[in-house]
Image (spheres, helix red, strand yellow):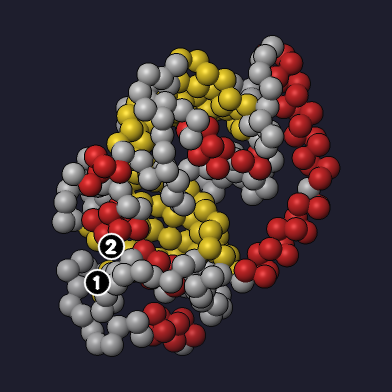
Amino acid sequence: MYKFYIALLLLSFSSCKYFSTYPDYDKTPTGIYYHLIFIGPEEKYPKPGDYITADICYQTMQDSIFFKGSRTFQITKPEFKGSIDECFLMMSEGDSTSFIINADNFFKKTLQAKLPSFIPENSEMKVGIKMRLIRTEKEYQREKEEFLAWIEDFGDYEKLILKRFIEEQKIGVDPMEDGLFYIQVKEGKGPKVKKGDVVLVDYEGKFLNGIFFDSTKKRHQPFEFVYGSELQVISGLEEAIGRMHEGEKAVVIIPSDLAFGESGSSTGIIPPFTSVIYEIELLKIYSKKEIKK
C-alpha cells in the first residue's frame, strides 16, 4: 500500500493520463517520459536551491551509453518545459527512474551546445537517474566544512603517496596551487578551449601503479562534451582541458579532491582518496560560433 501511494505521487505530475509512445513509460504534461524502477524508503523531494548527489547515465535511444557518473550539484528552477531539471525535481531520495527527454532541448538549451554526431536532430535520449542524497544549501555547506576538517589526516597520507610517485618517476614539474600536475607531451597548434566550446577528447585513465581503469582509445570512441558545464567531467580534467589548445597532448596527475573524492567512483572501480593519472589529447574544438551555424 505504501509503495502504491508513492507511485501515485509521481503520477500526480500529470493532470490527466497521457498515452505513452514507449511501453512501460508514462508521460508528464511537459513531454517527459518516465519509468519508475525503484522507490526510495521515504518521501524527500528536492527543491530549487537544494544540493543533490545522483548517479546519472545518458544513453541514445538504442541504449548506447555516452556518459555515466556520479555528480553532486545544486538544483535550479527549470528554465523551459521538459527540461532535465524537472526530472530531478520529480524524484525522492533513493528513487531510481528512467527518463526519455528531448535531445535537442538538452544539448541546445540546457548545455547550449550542438547535438553530438551520434544523435539525430529532433530525436530523444534516455536519462537514468539514481537519487542518492538530497541536502539543503545550509546542510551541504555545513557537511562540507565538517568533512574538510575530518579528512585532514587522510589528505596528508595521500600527499605522501603522491610525493613518492612524483619522486620515483622523476617528474620535473611543480604542482599547481590546488595540487594538480600538468605535463605537456605535445604542443597544440589550434585554438585554446573556452567555456561553452564543445570539445572532443581522447583519454586514458589509470592509477599511480599504472593499471588502467578507463580508455576512450580502447573503445575507439572519443568523448565529446561541453566545456564549462556541470555533469560532464571531474574537476581535475575540467581544469586540465581548460589549459589546452586543439591538438595538444598532456599527462595530468589529479589528487582525489579534484577527482573522485572521499566516496570514490560510483562504479566502485576507483576507491576513496585515490589520486589518478589521465593521458589526454584534445582532438577538436567546436566554438560557440560554429555551433550556432
Read off the residue under disc 1.
Answer: 31
> 117 or 91: which is nearer to us?
117
For residue 63, say whether it is visible: no
Q: Measured from the top left, where is residue 24 in percent x and y?
A: 26, 69
Lateral position of residue 225 relative to residue 146, left or right: left
Element under disc 1: loop
Q: Measured from the top left, where is residue 91 in percent x and y?
A: 45, 72
Of all residues, the one furthest to the right in this rendering is 153
Q: Residue at x 34, y 40 (%)?
A: 198
- Image quadrant containing the C terminus: top left
Lateral position of residue 122 relative to residue 129, left or right: left
Q: Residues within 10 Å of mark 1 (few under 14, many from 20)?
A: some
Query: Looking at numbered disc 2 in the image, what kind of residue is underneath it?
Result: Ile
Q: Measured from the top left, where is residue 65 in percent x and y?
A: 34, 45
CA distance separating discs 2 and 1: 7 Å
Q: Residues within 10 Å of mark 2 (few under 14, many from 20)?
A: many
Q: Earlier in the sequence, mark 2 or mark 1?
A: 1
Lateral position of residue 221 relative to residue 123, left or right: right
Q: Residue at x 37, y 18 (%)?
A: 189
CB within 8 Å, label 2 to label 1: yes
Read off the residue under disc 2.
Answer: 101
> 95 or 281: which is nearer to us?
281
Query: Looking at numbered disc 1 in the image, what kind of residue is underneath it?
Result: Gly
Element under disc 2: strand
> 236 or 211: which is nearer to us?
236
Q: Measured from the top left, where is residue 46 in percent x and y?
A: 52, 73
Residue 172 vs 273, above or below: the answer is: above
Q: Residue at x 23, y 56 (%)?
A: 104
Q: Residue at x 35, y 58 (%)?
A: 110
